[in-house]
Image (cartoon, coloured by chain):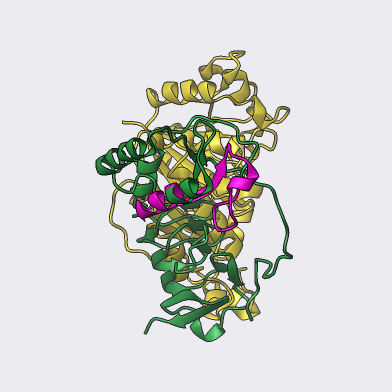
Chain colours: A yellow, B green
Amino acid sequence: MAKVLVVTSGKGGVGKTTSTAALGAALAQMGEKVVVIDFDVGLRNLDLVLGAERRVVFDLINVVQGVAKLSQALIRDKRLENLWLLPASQTRDKDALTDAGVGSIIAELRTRFDWILCDSPAGIERGAMLAMRYADEAVIVTNPEVSSVRDSDRIIGMLDSKTVKAERGERVEKHILITRYDSGRASRGEMLSIDDILEILATPLLGIIPESQDVLRASNVGSPVTLNNAASAPARAYTDAVRRLLGEAVTMTVPVERKGLMNRLLGRRAA
Amino acid sequence: MDAIAKAKRQPVRMRGRSYVAFTFCPVVPITGWLEEIDTTLARSPGFFAGKPVVLDLSAVDLSQSAIAHLVTSLEQRNIRVLGIEGVDADRVTTSMPPLLTGGRSCILAQNEPKKLEAKPKLPSLLLESPVRSGQSIFSEGDVIVLGSVGSGAEIVAGGSIHVYGTLRGRAMAGFSGNSAARIFCQRIEAELLAIDGYYQTAEEIDVALRHRPAQAWLEGDVMKIASLN
């Protein structure tokens, strides 16, 4: 049975799009049939992170308005045949999205895919509301800092009240994904500890993604980090998170950077 | 330091205000009319208790002493007369209720007295999940939260507030003038505490109390916050 998963956060710049691409690619690598939808109408990024920006013809808004068929707008990844992208429109804004339009697209995608990943825009307005509207599960991306944690708390409240599942009296299954975690700074008390975050949010942890240059490097070449350098610390952390999503029991660890000899000699810190 | 939300003193002002009063129109013979009153009282004792009653004497012609006797007879039945109308000013003495004029008739709600007698008990609100940032909880009675109250969340209660997790948001108890309301929490990191309009912000709450179980209550117009153990 297909699962609709929204990747959301409230706050911007915490790593929603990067995480959507990485989780989507990792799920596809494990044999699941995955579609990622960019809900950030007007500020689309997911096509860039997936390296599909030059193949966008039709987009989400075209499908919502009936200009194009869903099959015309879906873009298949060149590296992973199980991974598809439904891009956002860059020329429109979020008001062009309608509840009924999104509902019918999600319903159609449910018949064709195992996983439907919705990349939510930042904020709590229309785009973010519609991205979470039909979700069965939610990944709340949080940075270890107070503003991000409070915004996540707000989003969790909305997942419990504004989604179709919540209105039916059911629960959206929620997971916390902590990104940009720097174990060095955390041990010096310069950022919120994992325990503090989980205590405030009272929601189970899906994974801890370490702060790494690999994430930026992967984005720049238009490749999800799990695909670009599968051995890197963030890629391993995302893969572990996906295995937990699929129901496997994986011990929670904070993957660390494997520093090369030259790096250590030069004392360069992966920040 | 306590900030005070209400002005303490108001200058004396006169204002006109209208009230609904029962009007009795006695008829002769007065003894027979009083018996009618007695049967009404036998059916529902206390029906007129605390209600303003006006005597309209326009239908009868009573002497000063007869009026005095009628007022006393009613007082013996626990009916206090607020005023008299429909007689000449010289028939009324200073010891009697004052003479009223300009009354207008209106319809009395039949079930009004019963409503006032049975004060409904305000139900308390129990929340089993955490109160998230941005949520606002409102209840006329007590509010009990089993989880935490997030930063940026708000609880407004007519009664007391009990939080069995960490209180990080705002808690406003006794908003409708209930100064006996209290706030309890397992761990205090509140942004604001208020009881009956008196409030303290996070900055004013003693640092030594932070992260500990605590309660807040009002002593006069001073809010007290103390550790629970």
Q: Residue at x 47, y 65 (%)?
A: A197
| Camera-side residue of B1 and A105 | B1
Coordinates of residue B191 in the picture (x, y in percent): 57, 68
Residue B132 forms part of the magenta stretch:
no
Q: Horizontally, is B119 left or right of B208 in the view?
A: left
Q: Give, as a single range, the part of the protein colored magenta.
A: B70-98
| Camera-side residue of B41 and A220 | B41
Q: Is residue A227 visible?
A: no
| Camera-side residue of B36 and A203 | B36
Coordinates of residue B153 in the picture (x, y in percent): 53, 57
Q: Residue at x 53, y 52 (%)?
A: A154
Q: Is residue B39 visible?
A: yes
Q: Quadrant of residue B14?
A: bottom right
Q: Which quadrant: the C terminus of chain B? A: bottom left
Coordinates of residue A113 in the picture (x, y in percent): 39, 28
Q: Residue at x 46, y 57 (%)?
A: B158
| Camera-side residue of B2 and A236 | B2
Residue B95 forms part of the magenta stretch:
yes
Looking at the image, which residue sits at the far left? B42
Q: Residue at x 59, y 73 (%)?
A: B202
Coordinates of residue A35 in the picture (x, y in percent): 47, 32
Q: How many marks?
A: 0
Q: Is residue B220 above or below residue B195?
A: below
Q: Which quadrant: the N terminus of chain B? A: bottom right
